[in-house]
Amino acid sequence: MDEKLIQRLESAVIRLESLSSGFHPHQLERGGDAGVDVKLDPSITAFDDMMTQYLGRVSSVAEKIGGKVLDVTKSLQEAFSVQRELLIKVKQTQKPDLAGLAEFLKPLNEVIIKANSLTEGKRSDYFNHLKAGADSLAALAWIAYSGKDCGMSMPIAHVEESWQMAEFYNNKILVEYKTKDPNHVEWAKALKELYLPGLRDYVKSFYPLGPVWNSSCTTTIPLTSAPPKAPGPVPPPPPPASLFSSASSSTSSSRPKEGMAAVFQEISSGKPVTSGLRKITDDMKTKNRSDKTGVVNASGKETRTSSTSFSKAGPPKLELQMGRKWAVENQIGRKELVIDDCDAKQSVYVFGCKDSVLQIQGKVNNITVDKCTKMGIVFTDVLAACEIVNCNGVEVQCQGSAPTISVDNTAGCQLYLSKAYLETSITTAKSSEINVLVPGAGADNDWVEHSLPQQYVHVFKNGQFVTSPVSHTGG
């Protein structure tokens, strides 16, 4: 039998299976199809096939699970459908300017913000599913790539890097449900395959250098609102970093936005950056303090840090992605990292940093510190949890409230709790040298250090094992 015929039959079977689960890639109106024969265009047909094969599998498993998992999967469907409409618009319009590009990307941004809202509020049993699904949607922003100077990675690399952010939570699903429910494991595997190889291979085949606009067309993207006027006083600086730009030599968020940052400034409304913020300097680190109490103070004279080195894993980043996640990556020797314009709907993800200090000034939803060495984190309030995983020699100070702090697969961790919130729940697993410091009884008393046990005794009593920490007593 002809090989092409076999491929067409396999594609038809996959489409029928996805239709039986209630999913169809053409869920949105085709109002933008005018002027473009969607059925014959190879890139649009390939995108439909990719959605049917990979997204259809995710949707089919989500139907079996239901609940929050089905909700976030529907957000995935909506986001991919919006991207399909944007791909059609690309073929119908000229390459827009920054204001036009902002208007072009607005529908995608709104869907991603809607998906991220599912992760807010009280932490559900399916939090990892929600985070994995919502965070993965950043990969769809490859369509915003406009050249090497736009502040983004190349489209293929952007898809791969964006999935790495979501894979942290996706791996948690695989571990948690490995022996509990195969449907959740199948959903997590299908989600990964949607991006790797699904979306990555699609971009590699049709748009490796970014979207190809219709230069021969006279149609432009209409603006729903007038762009900001040039005359007038200089506005206050925008929120720190853009969705795609990498952190440069200046890590402060008061730097004005350029390139893609200006595009997304049009989309999301930001609060003015607080002026006069005090920075965390090298002399505030525990190892450099003369009193040896280990408290990271937010006050002190600013000093210049030593020459900064860069991680071989990738370029340093300090950026706000899709208006909902702060990504701090590959920072080495940076003692004055500051996030000073955040809110309770945003999360912070710190990855691959070394010998640096990050201060988070404001309330955030969640903080994750992953694969960091000799890293200091100072934060005010966190609504859900502060998670420390795969780290070595980190210090974390909570100046306000944190319902939960979890430490997993970490060697050496100092936790500082505020006096007003000592009831914080601390969970540890596969970790050693975990010390918790709490304020003394008096106002001028030193901090009191408590070492969390890492050795346990298991004794079989009355038909069950009784576990208790090892206690060392002197003579």
Image (cartoon, grey):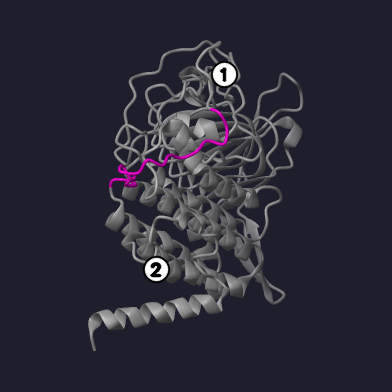
Identify the mark at residue 401; answer none if there is no mark: none
Which span is picked out in magenta?
A: 209-226
Q: How many residues crowd mark 2 within 10 Å: few (<14), some (14–19), many (20+)?
A: many
Q: 450 or 297, which is in the foreground?
A: 297
Residue 216 magenta-highlighted: yes
Above or below residue 416? Residue 335 is above
Q: Position of residue 90 (x, y in %)?
A: 39, 48
Rendered residue at 46%/29% (across/down): 262
Q: Are marks 1 and 2 in contact (CB under 8 Å)?
A: no
Of circles 1 and 2, the one toward us is 2
In the image, 470 versus 32, the foreground residue is 32
Q: Is residue 388 visible?
A: no
Q: Position of residue 425 (x, y in %)?
A: 69, 47
State the image quarter where residue 353 is shown.
top left
Residue placed under numbered mark 1 in the picture = 291
Q: Is residue 178 left or right of residue 220?
A: right
Prevailing secondary structure class for the magenta stretch in the rendered image: loop
**Earlier residue among tags 1 and 2:** 2
The residue type indicated by label 2 comes to: Asp
Q: CA distance from mark 1 to mark 2?
A: 64 Å
**Which residue does the image show at 41% across and 42% down from the upper left?**
219
Category of crowding for the residue at label 1, using alpha-carbon neighbours closer than 10 angstroms: few (below 14), some (14–19), many (at least 20): few
Can residue 331 be spotted in the picture?
yes
- Residue under circle 2? 49
Query: Amino acid type of disc 1?
Result: Asp
Q: Quadrant of the N terminus?
A: bottom left
Q: Kindly state the secondary structure of the residue where label 2 is placed.
A: helix
Of the 4 image quadrants, the one containing the C terminus is: top right
